[in-house]
Image (cartoon, rainbow, N blue to C red):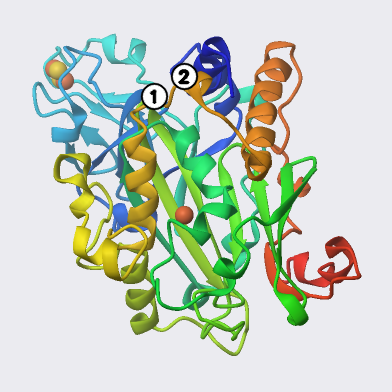
Amino acid sequence: MLSREENELVTRVGPGTPMGEVLRRYWMPALLVSDLPAPDCPPVRVKLLGEELVAFRDTDGKVGLLDEYCPHRLASLFLGRNEECGLRCVYHGWKFDVAGNCTDMPNEPPESRFKEKIHLQAYPTVELGGVIWAYLGPAEKKPEPPGMEWLRAPEQYRYVSKTMEYCNFVQGIEGGIDTVHSSFLHNNDLANKGLRQIDTSPRLEVERTDYGFRYASIRNAGDEGNYVRVYQFVLPFHQFRSQRIDSRASTGKAADVPSIRGHMWVPMDDENTMIFNWMYAIDPAIPFTPDYIVKAETSSGRGPDGESGTVRRQTRENDWLIDRERQRTKTFTGIKGLNTQDLAVQESMGRIVPRWREHLGSTDKAVAAMRRILLDMVKDVRDGRDPLGVNPDTYRGVRAADAMLPKDVPWQDAARDLLVARV
Ligand code: FES
Ligand SMILES: [Fe+2]
């Protein structure tokens, strides 16, 4: 539970808000590299932390991320012509390079030096792991580029997609670090008990780290041992989880492509989030195939016919296409797509959930810890300290794990090797 004031503090992300200032200290995923596939391709709109921006790839392949509105009379540069190393406004022809300099002003006399006075807000970007990252914070505080293990995975071993979510980003993170709901929300086979249905009230252990926290959910799997999933939460909004064991199967059989997956819940504004979904294969002998990617994305609710980018088919307006007959006979929710189930419950809470009305229980430990950390970050930045996890060295070497572990050894020891990055 948070007070109204605390809820405001953690959820508001615009310029000048306390959480907005925290988030501006990290590199933010802004786009997929494939959104800007080639030099001089069409520009795209980007909404990030309440700011309306436009991104383009110039003739040299460099990415520019600029204020969307032309400083002349504020026409949208989304309509602009991307040509000869700059984005040209279609209203009166002013042209800007990736650094926001005005390089041409054809509606002024040739001798005019007016263009030298004009500068458009431009943010630095870096391309890593199929994602274009942007830094919206103070220049002197710009950290090293992000260093998660999945960013280092070779291309055939990695896949990233994005999905729009119509609610505040903290709701998304809370779903992502709430391992317990998978026993319920994601139970897609009412007739057969999967690993996560054997014990629906796992014990949670949260350990704070210098990048956020890691936590284990420990399920009693009888004679086999404990089924332990260790998640990583890397600030400010990054979840890693392991898919080594396919826990949707009724036994602990190994997943067909052992992989680690996760999401980043990137605030577009206070009430909308762009989720970046990533996965990477961790067995060098088993890369992803195009077929596998389609299968994995489709079961998550994305894929060619599912929810992707800003195209959402299952929304509040159509009750996320809940199928009551299916809910009665086959799956817990009657909603198609694992991640669409997440979107449905999170969006069902409203754009910003009133957390002062909640009743948290023992399995909400990770959720409570995450909120506490976000509040601490607000305080740290306000007091002039760096927030946790801006330095990529703090999390470069970590990964998530899931495994059947012996009952008599602490998970920290039994899973030690599994929790070390190898790429
Ligand atoms: S509004 Fe862009 S050039 Fe005039
Ligand atoms: Fe989920």
Q: Nearer the viewer, residue 379 or 393?
A: 379
Report the quarter where the N terminus lies. Answer: top right
Q: In the displayed orientation, state which residue is furthest to the bottom.
A: 285
Q: Nearer the viewer, residue 403 or 41?
A: 403
Q: Nearer the viewer, residue 234 or 208?
A: 208
Q: Amino acid at mark 1?
A: Asp
SS category of the residue bearing label 2:
loop
Relative to 342, say whether 283 is above or below: below
Q: Name the spot of residue 383 as percent of width and height, x first.
A: 74, 11
Binning the other alpha carbons within 10 Å of mark 1 as few (below 14), some (14 to 19) or many (20 upward) gives many
Left or right: 351 in relation to 29:
left
Q: Amino acid at mark 2?
A: Arg
Q: Residue at x 51, y 59 (%)?
A: 182
Relative to 3, say whether 238 is above or below: below
Task: Return the mark for residue 64.
Answer: none
Ligand 2 within 8 Å of the CB at mark 2:
no
SS category of the residue bearing label 1:
loop
Residue receiving disc 2: 12
Q: Name the spot of residue 337 as percent of width and height, x first.
A: 32, 63
Residue 317 picture quarter: top left
Residue receiving disc 1: 270
Residue 61 visible in rendering: no
Q: Name the spot of residue 313 as percent of width and height, x first.
A: 18, 52
